Image: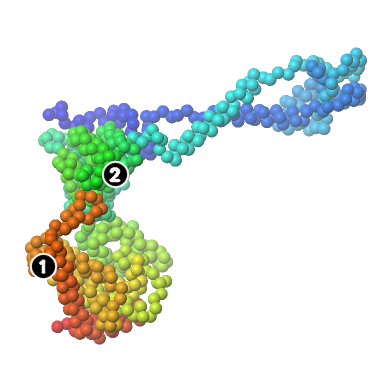
Amino acid sequence: MNDDKNLYFESKKQKENEKPGIHNDKGINPNTKKKFSFTIIYFIIMFIFLIMINNMLFKSHMEPIEIEYSTFKSMISQGQIQQVVFNENNYIGYSITKDEARATLEEYAKTRQLPNTIDKSMLLAYQTYKIDDPTFITLLDEKGVQYYASAPATTPIWLSLLSTFLPLIIFFVLMRMLSKRLEGGAQSVMSFNQNKSKIVAEGDTGVRFADVAGCEESKAELVEVVDFLKNGEKYTKIGAKIPKGVLLVGPPGTGKTLLAKAVAGEAGVPFFRMSGADFVEMFVGVGAARVRDLFKQAREKAPCIIFIDEIDAIGKQRSASLGGNDEREQTLNQLLVEMDGFDSRSGVIILAATNRAEILDPALLRPGRFDRQVLVDKPDLEGRLAILKIHSSKLILDNSVDLKKIAQGCAGLAGADLANICNEAALLAVRRNKEKVSQLEFEEAIEKSIAGLERKGRIMNESERKRVAYHETGHALTAYMTKGASPVSKISIVPRGFGALGYTLQYPTEDRFLLSEGELLGSIDVLLGGRAAEEITFGDISTGASNDISRASDQVRKMICDYGMSERFKNLTLPKSSSGIEGVAGGREYSEDTQKYIDEESERRISERYSIVLANLKKNWKALDEIAKKLLADEVIEQDEFERLAKEYVIIE
């Protein structure tokens, strides 16, 4: 027993130093030697160019001037030439002596400027063709002119080599620089099989369980994972095995990724994060190679956590698509093999997240792979309140802020939505030059999240404004008269979102998980209240109720087909079959006669509920008219004002 336990706890530091392919959080391999730098090559090239420029700058003052031989002798006689060099075919005369030239060169080498003691106009050289003249040497001796012969000019070997290899060196350097730029812009072709996971150093996720709220049950399920990574001895000692994989399932924005980071942060172990889409490429076999590479690195980093976000990108049922995708299926097969291939004692825990668990392959969900499925659902009232406390802790809040009321108004929203509402409220406060965030900014942020952006620039004509006002008042009055309906928080005829000319907000006072048949019918009544108010007021109907009718129709069909709430199929569901092809709806599993009954029953119930709503609004026409006129005048009616007017005019038997 002692030989088997704590395999991954032994020689951890030694393994850290020996592993060859692991990168740190900055993507740098500490064991990889630095590549040869080309700085010395750049220096050599620059030095050679400086020498050549230096020579050209100085020699430009000593460039020989072509003159006739007689003029050359005359200048020697007049003392204008102090030094003569005998070349193979000509004479070159200089206006200064050899000693003066050496002194000038030394001074120039120090200061890069010609000495002030020498007249720059006298630094001249004269050249003439050699002529057979016996008196020429005598003239030089008489005038004291220095003369000597020079060997034929030859090109230095270093200059020959430089002229040969310098273009090749420049070409090689340019190609190297271009290659580096290409590697920086895109992955090398030879690196397709390497995984793209982001490795976070121990404890660097920056997230703890205290930063996660609204999912206490989910956190409790993950405590064992953290405890195993911290204290694996007590589990291996008794012979227990920690689950190899934990699948986080829930709607978008509920905090699945945040929970995975919190697990890594609490355990203080390396955290490999990768998206399911990162495995799939256009080349078949690349995804499988990346899976192998990921698990290889994870074993060398053990104990650690592998987190695969949106695992449904590679984990879909292999029979769910027509013909299949070879690349995705090979990647999934390799993932299944790797999850079977390592022992739970290796210290590698796999976390995955998805919001579509129903489409995952059964082989992925069986015990031994993802042993535990943790539901991360939308938060309840207490959960929303806890999330708001976390996100609002960084804001400067006014005393008027009531977080519980805000949480009540955010029913059905996920943690990401609540974080966005807090941020939007802060932005609104800054836009209004406020030093604190008040309750008003939070309420407007909720409206923006639920109903969309306010569009005051959209101007409706008076007849449309009137129709919208009566329509929204019909919704609000029907909700007020319907037992069990959520109270109306606000009525507005200010356009919002995409196509919404007005809206009625209802904030539930508590979370509801079950609805009775009467409550479902009441929600249908509220949806039909807008069109009924239009018919009573204007004698006709408009397209403004299209969304209301669609939602009411869906609700009635669900009552008949899904909830068993019909006279003929009282305790029976009428589902539609799956086609087996993704994106293609299946056929129904009942007869044409049953479909006819569903259509007729749906129409009967909608007509029945519409008649009831119509009668109630006709009975309370004065309330409808007074509230609609108030709405036309003010554009917005808050909850307190609406309830005051409703109590004054509504007649409820």
Picture residue at 13% right of the left edge, 59% below the top: 590
Looking at the rendering, in which quadrant would you find the C terminus? bottom left
Q: Residue at coordinates 73% horizontally, 29% vertically from top-left?
A: 58
| Residue carrying label 2 | 276
Q: Could you tell me the amino acid type at mark 2?
A: Gly
Quarter of the view holding residue 649: bottom left
x 75%, y 30%: residue: 60
Q: The disc labelled 1 sits on which kind of residue?
A: Ser
Can residue 197 be seen here? The reply is yes
User: Which mark is drawn over residue 566?
Assistant: 1
Give whichever of discs 1 and 2 has the lower sequence position.
Answer: 2
How many marks the image carries: the answer is: 2
Q: Secondary structure at mark 2?
A: helix
Secondary structure at numbered mark 1: loop
Closer to the camera, 471 or 144?
471
Q: Nearer the viewer, residue 224 or 20?
A: 20
Within-10-Å neighbours for mark 2: few <14, some 14–19, many 20+ = many
582 to 293, vertically: above or below: below
Residue at image coords 31%, 29%: 19
